[in-house]
Amino acid sequence: VGSTHGGSEASVPVWVERSGRQLAERRLQDAQASGALAKFAGLLTSLAELFSVSCLDRVHIFEEDSQTVAFNGGALFFNLRYFITERHTESWEEAVCFWTVSFAHELAHFESVVHDRQHGRAMENAQRAMLPGLPSVLSRPWGAPPGQRPAWSVQSD
């Protein structure tokens, strides 16, 4: 998905599961029609900016019917299905709170692949570094400037 975010172009690749691909693509179309995909992309773009991470290179959305929230596979992957199932579309503040912690957790896996002391320290450092910018993110629901709605477009490759 792509949009103008904060005055610059933003793009977040979207992946669907291989098994059950048709159903996943249908859920993705429903998410686009309902605005959930745009909200999730706006949220992740805002968090990437907050953590100083490149969206196109490092942030991806995947659509999979699983309890996997996110994972780090050389880039950060966040589950749209989980976002929708947990009803994070209903509250910007709750979505920011939940996904900020998830974002920091997955970023920490660049420092350590396991959940050890190094991972914990990296996660704490990431959270501490982003805190000053958090009020700015909270003031822009779904990544849009105050009083505006985010506009995203889907492009298939």
Image (cartoon, grey):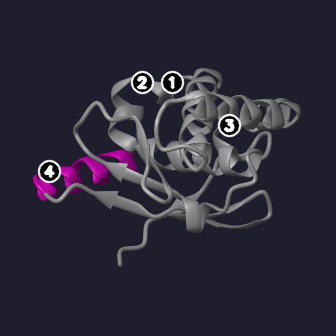
* Residue 13 left/right relative to 57: left
Which kind of residue does numbered mark 4 sit on? Leu
Image position, residue 41 (x, y; %)? 54, 50
Q: Between disc 4 and disc 2, whose residue precedes?
A: 4
Q: Is residue 67 above or below residue 5?
A: above
**Start and end of the magenta stretch?**
19-33
Q: Residue furthest front?
A: 117
* The disc label shown at residue 122, or none: 3
**Residue at numbered disc 4:** 23
**Residue at numbered disc 2:** 87
Which kind of residue does numbered mark 2 sit on? Arg
* Disc 3 from disc 2: Cα separation: 29 Å
* Disc 4 from disc 2: Cα separation: 20 Å
Determine if the magenta segment contains residue 113. no
Which kind of residue does numbered mark 1 sit on? Glu
**What secondary structure prevails in the magenta region?**
helix
Q: Between disc 4 and disc 1, whose residue precedes?
A: 4
Q: Are the two marked residues, 1 and 2, in contact with CB atoms closer than 8 angstroms?
A: yes
Q: Is residue 150 above or below residue 97?
A: below
